[in-house]
Image (spheres, rainbow, N blue to C red):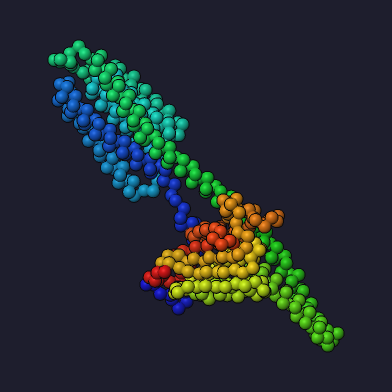
């Protein structure tokens, strides 16, 4: 167990989501090529031995068996690379397919050249290249394949048939063509389907990244606008506070208890406005890292609840921490703002009471806000967390949950929204202790 030092230095928050998957479509496609090469190796060895020993067709066994051995070494090297890497480059996929084309060319050269019915296996490499490679690379595979096929028509080691097979070369060619066609069809179905799925997953991943980038740009603009407005409002609020202080000492007001009470109420309102502006600036990042708050979860949540009750008198808010022990955390202002947004959303949705339930397991802190309001509509649940998607029906609504979702995502957590069985809405904010905790403990839920 790691313990906190006397003067703990806050760890920087993780501003890249820990749950983002690696863009490993190239790695998965290379793994499929390795599987295809293993099948090719097994098929080549079986075909060579069957043709030479069972059919009595003389083949250069030594030379032809060297090719699958080299392919096996290629596969071993590819697997070692796959274990160390999270993705494979386009150039590496191109070289892998080019190796398979040259290996097939070598085998065809040693077994009849263009007269070998397995010449059609070039189409498998071309089809794989059309799916996996860029345009120039695909045409490179096409050019190499057609050039090799053309060369094999003139340069090859001829097959010699003897005994019962003598004079039946055409019949053997027809049977071999059927076998090759069946192999090509089966291989294309077996391998093109998962390759297409890998490509679709990659495109979906890139689309999610683009969406997140657009949302984060939107948040940056909102933060700049809020920060600018906070700075602009700070000066008139300060002047108003000075004026109210002067009023308090004026004889006309000092001798009138009713006016004194009104001045005190206005001063309290000014202090409240200053506190809100300070929170806006901190949430915008201007105060981040300057004075980090090291506290425990219970105290942090209770203070949020206390401030919210003070700002919303008459609205019941119950906090339930359950039978858990909580570690000390570095409480970032954006977490406070996210929890406050959840509470504000519950109030604005027509709730007459709000429950905030806090729990934990070995890795996550769970903060759940439950209310008895209108709940989420089916359309809202489908788009929950997107900007300007709100059930309140007012212009500019829907930013509260949008900010909560993005705060959770940036801290490596997640947000789940649902409706309660007896009505109302329930939103759970999950944050990882790996990001928040000042010290790691081994206690579970």
Residue 171 on image: x %, y %: 24, 15
Residue 357 position (above or below residue 135): below
Residue 403 on image: x %, y %: 59, 59
Q: Residue at x 44, y 51 (%)?
A: 21
In the displayed structure image, the side of residue 89 where residue 118 appears, left or right: left
116 vs 260, nearest the viewer: 260
Q: Residue at x 39, y 71 (%)?
A: 443
Residue 141 in view in this figure: no
Residue 393 on image: x %, y %: 69, 55
Instruction: Find the residue positioned furthest to the right.
Output: 252
Quadrant hosting residue 34: top left
In the displayed structure image, the side of residue 63 where residue 420 appears, left or right: right
In the displayed structure image, the side of residue 170 where residue 208 appears, left or right: right
Q: Residue at x 26, y 17 (%)?
A: 173
- Quarter of the image with the C terminus is bottom left
Q: Residue at x 78, y 79 (%)?
A: 262
């Amino acid at each position: 167990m790691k313990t906190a030092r006397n003067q703990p230095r806050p760890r920087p928050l993780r501003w890249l989501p820990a749950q983002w998957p690696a863009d490993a479509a190239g790695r998965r496609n290379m793994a499929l090529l390795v599987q295809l090469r293993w099948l090719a190796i097994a098929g080549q060895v079986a075909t060579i031995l069957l043709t030479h020993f069972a059919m009595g067709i003389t083949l250069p066994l030594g030379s032809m068996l060297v090719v699958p051995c080299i392919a096996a070494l290629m596969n071993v090297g590819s697997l070692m690379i796959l274990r160390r890497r999270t993705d494979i480059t386009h150039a590496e996929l191109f070289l892998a397919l080019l190796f398979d084309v040259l290996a097939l060319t070598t085998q065809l050269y040693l077994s009849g050249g263009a007269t070998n019915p397995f010449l059609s296996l070039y189409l498998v490499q071309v089809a794989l290249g059309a799916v996996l490679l860029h345009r120039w690379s695909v045409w490179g595979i096409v050019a190499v394949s057609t050039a090799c096929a053309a060369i094999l028509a003139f340069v090859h080691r001829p097959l010699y048939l003897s005994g019962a097979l003598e004079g039946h070369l055409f019949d053997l060619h027809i049977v071999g063509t059927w076998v090759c066609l069946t192999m090509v069809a089966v291989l294309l179905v077996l391998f093109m389907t998962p390759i297409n799925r890998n490509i679709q997953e990659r495109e979906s991943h890139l689309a999610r990244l683009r969406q997140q980038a657009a949302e984060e740009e939107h948040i940056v603009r909102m933060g700049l606008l809020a920060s600018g407005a906070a700075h602009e409002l700070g000066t008139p609020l300060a002047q108003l506070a000075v004026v109210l202080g002067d009023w308090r000492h004026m004889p006309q007001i000092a001798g009138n208890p009713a006016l004194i009470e009104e001045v005190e109420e206005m001063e309290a309102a000014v202090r409240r406005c200053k506190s809100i502006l300070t929170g806006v600036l901190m949430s915008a990042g201007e105060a981040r890292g300057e004075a980090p708050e090291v506290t425990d979860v219970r105290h942090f949540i209770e203070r949020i609840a206390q401030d919210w009750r003070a700002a919303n008198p008459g609205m019941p808010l119950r906090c339930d921490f359950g039978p858990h022990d909580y570690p000390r955390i570095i409480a970032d202002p954006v977490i406070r703002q996210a929890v406050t947004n959840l509470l504000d959303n519950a109030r604005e949705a027509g709730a007459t009471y709000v429950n905030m339930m806090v729990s934990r397991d070995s890795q996550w802190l769970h903060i759940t806000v439950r209310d008895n309001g209108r709940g989420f509509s089916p359309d809202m649940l489908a788009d929950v967390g997107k900007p300007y998607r709100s059930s309140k029906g007012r212009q500019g609504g829907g930013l509260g949950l949008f900010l909560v979702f993005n705060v959770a995502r940036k801290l490596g957590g997640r947000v789940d929204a649902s409706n309660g069985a007896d009505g109302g809405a329930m939103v759970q904010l999950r944050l990882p202790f790996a990001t928040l905790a000042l010290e790691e403990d081994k206690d579970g839920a």
